[in-house]
Amino acid sequence: MQNKRKYKNVVHQLSVTLEDLYDAAIRKQTLQNNVICDRCEYTAVIIAEVLERK
């Protein structure tokens, strides 16, 4: 059984028009989550490299 960390839900308010809702307009967003590795204290960008060395 894996321990999965549960993070807080992210709420972001978007401004859309009634026409956008009617036409089912699509809005794209990107999210970035900065995580610190407990073992080596590097940021998430470097965690992938650390996991490959195990």
Image (tube, grey):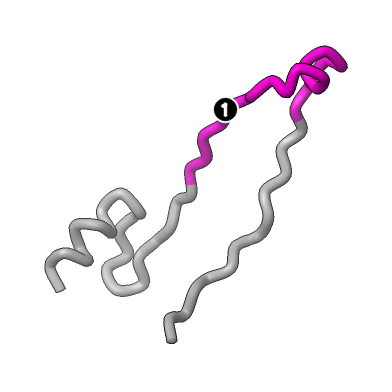
Query: Residue 12 versus residue 18: which sits nearer the camera?
Result: 18
Residue at point 39%, 61% (across, down): 36
Check disc 1 and report its element: helix, strand or loop: loop
> What range is drawn magenta here?
14-32
Q: Is residue 28 magenta?
A: yes
Residue at point 52%, 71% (across, down): 5
Crowdedness of circle 1 by 10 Å Cα count: few (<14), some, many (20+)? few
> Which residue is denoted by mark 1 in the rendering?
28
**Would residue 35 be found to the left or right of residue 7 on screen?**
left
Residue at point 87%, 17% (across, down): 18
Query: On screen, 43 above or below 5?
Result: above
Residue 28, horizontal then vertical, whole percent = 57, 27
Tally the numbered discs.
1
- Majority secondary structure of magenta residues: loop
Residue 49, horizontal then vertical, whole percent = 19, 57
Residue at point 82%, 19% (across, down): 22
